[in-house]
Image (cartoon, grey):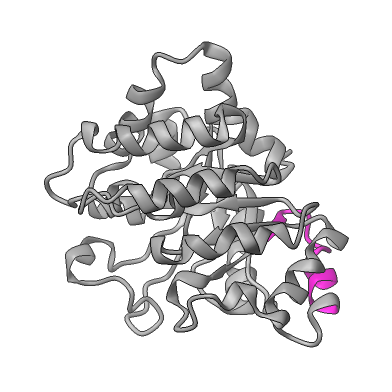
Amino acid sequence: MIDSHQHFWKYDPLIHNWINDDMAVIRRDFLPEHLAAVFKENQVDGCVAVQAEHTAGDNDFLLDMSFANDFVKGIVGWVDLQSPDIASDLYKLANFPKIKGVRHILQGETQRDLMLTKSFLNGIRHLEEVGFTYDILVSADQLQFIPQFVSHLPNQLFVLDHMGKPGIKQGEIQNWKKNIELLARHEQVHCKVSGMLTEADLQGWKKEDFRPYLDVVVEAFGVERLMYGSDWPVCLAAADYKQSLDVVKSYFSSFSSLEQQLFFDENARDFYRLA
């Protein structure tokens, strides 16, 4: 099993100011030594560590974690995609085989359609040159812009983080579903089944809450373009790792063994070219 989406950080209240009082349980350090035992208990073989800061220093931090821990199979790092030096910056990152792609925390940007600007698209166009993937992190209100965004780049591999963050707690599904279906028509776009629990009622969620949203992404993307991600340690604000994993294990239990193997393992390995 591959966990395609998790984070490490040394907690800093200024840098990690997005962690609100409802998520106070994750206001601490989360490092590989905290995750190794969790993976062993849940039979997870490896993971993709995803950036949590817009700094080059975060790339160095994640690389150090990966060099010291074999279960960190790949890294989704960060680079300033709007920099005039984007090409040379990407080639420097490409010297590190563990870095498989990059991400920008678009959900936190004041300009909600930043991904459609000329400077941002120019940066994305350089990713293919070095073989990098791109993780799309947006909130549900920004999902409307993503079909147009990816249409500019038909050969670039994308993956949507956290299913586009649907409003599970509010029971909102129609607009999100429409945008997911439009996005899934672009075959270079994949989707992470991750981050669901923190979009639901943190204390009162039930497995049934997630089924309508899972049905949508399975129907839209097919099992071949979906991959499992825990969003550890963010998921701990709603449940422990096993409880979070059990939500998707329960849903996919009726799927064939091949489909489960694709979802929990092979799709992430192929997408990120994991050793």
Q: Is residue 91 magenta?
A: yes
Q: Is residue 126 left or right of residue 201?
A: right
Q: Is residue 208 left or right of residue 152?
A: left
The magenta-colored residue range is 88-102
Q: Is residue 93 left or right of residue 198?
A: right
Is any atom of residue 41 visible in this view? no
- The quarter holding residue 42 reads top left
The vertical placement of 106 against 39, above or below, is below
Q: Position of residue 199 (x, y in %)?
A: 29, 53
- Residue under the point 70% across and 58% down: 151
Residue 74 in the image: above or below residue 217? below
Q: Is residue 170 above or below residue 10?
A: above
Number of callouts in the render? 0
Magenta region includes residue 155: no
Q: Identify the residue shown where x is 28% and y is 62%.
A: 26
Residue sticking out furthest to the left: 204
Q: Residue at x 78, y 60 (%)?
A: 96
Q: Nearer the viewer, residue 4 or 252?
A: 252
Image coordinates of residue 232 in percent, x first then y, are: 39, 51
Residue 205 % position (x, y): 17, 42
Residue 178: % across, % down: 45, 48
Q: Nearer the viewer, residue 255 or 221?
A: 221
Q: Is residue 22 visible?
A: yes
Q: In the image shown, does 28 or 148 lie closer to the viewer?
A: 148
Residue at 79% across, 87% down: 84
Quarter of the figure with the C terminus: top right
Residue 63, quarter of the rendered image? bottom right
Q: Between 75 and 255, which is closer to the camera in this rendering?
A: 255
